[in-house]
Amino acid sequence: MSVFLVISAVEAQQAFFAAVSDLPLMPGLVETADVALVFDNPAGRIVELEATGAVAAGAVRSFYAETLPQLGWEPIGDGRYVREGELLTLVVEAASGGLVARFFITPSEDPAP
């Protein structure tokens, strides 16, 4: 009897941001640890993370467009996702030798698009 194991892109991905254990770090990106900001308050958490790498901006957007929904983030357009009262925004910018990917998580008043 053959047994097949199916592993999602998220499960196969082993690197995650240190400050947000359920936000994967795309292969080819390196977390900029000294930029990380995590603030919890009664309204929710505020998180700012950054990663850099010599990868294409389209590849970063595609990776997170495929991966984040597997973690419960619903896409609402323009690199924005909502989940359980939080808004995650992904901003990708060109930088010397590659790009910078910035992630912002803030409380979301209205999780609907």
Image (cartoon, rainbow, N blue to C red):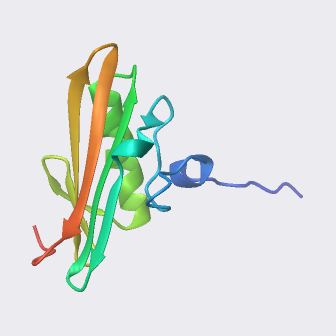
Q: Quadrant of the C terminus?
A: bottom left
- How far across and how far down the image is residue 105, in percent? 25, 61
Q: Residue at x 30, y 25 (%)?
A: 99
Q: Indicate whether 72 appears above or below 69.
A: below
User: In screen coordinates, is 91 left or right of 69?
Assistant: left
- Which of these two is toward me, 95 or 55? 95
User: In screen coordinates, is 109 left or right of 82?
Assistant: left
Given the current orientation, which residue lies at the most extreme top position? 97
Q: Indicate whether 78 appears above or below 86.
A: above
Q: Indicate whether 92 appears above or below 11.
A: above
Q: Quadrant of the N terminus?
A: bottom right
What count of labels does the image hold? 0
Q: Residue at x 50, y 61 (%)?
A: 21
- How far across and how far down the image is residue 3, in percent? 81, 57
- How far across and how far down the image is residue 44, in percent? 25, 78
Given the current orientation, which residue lies at the most extreme right position? 1
Q: Residue at x 61, y 48 (%)?
A: 14
Q: Residue at x 51, y 34 (%)?
A: 27
- How far across and how far down the image is residue 12, in percent? 61, 48
- Which of these two is toward me, 18 or 112? 18
Given the current orientation, which residue lies at the most extreme front position? 34
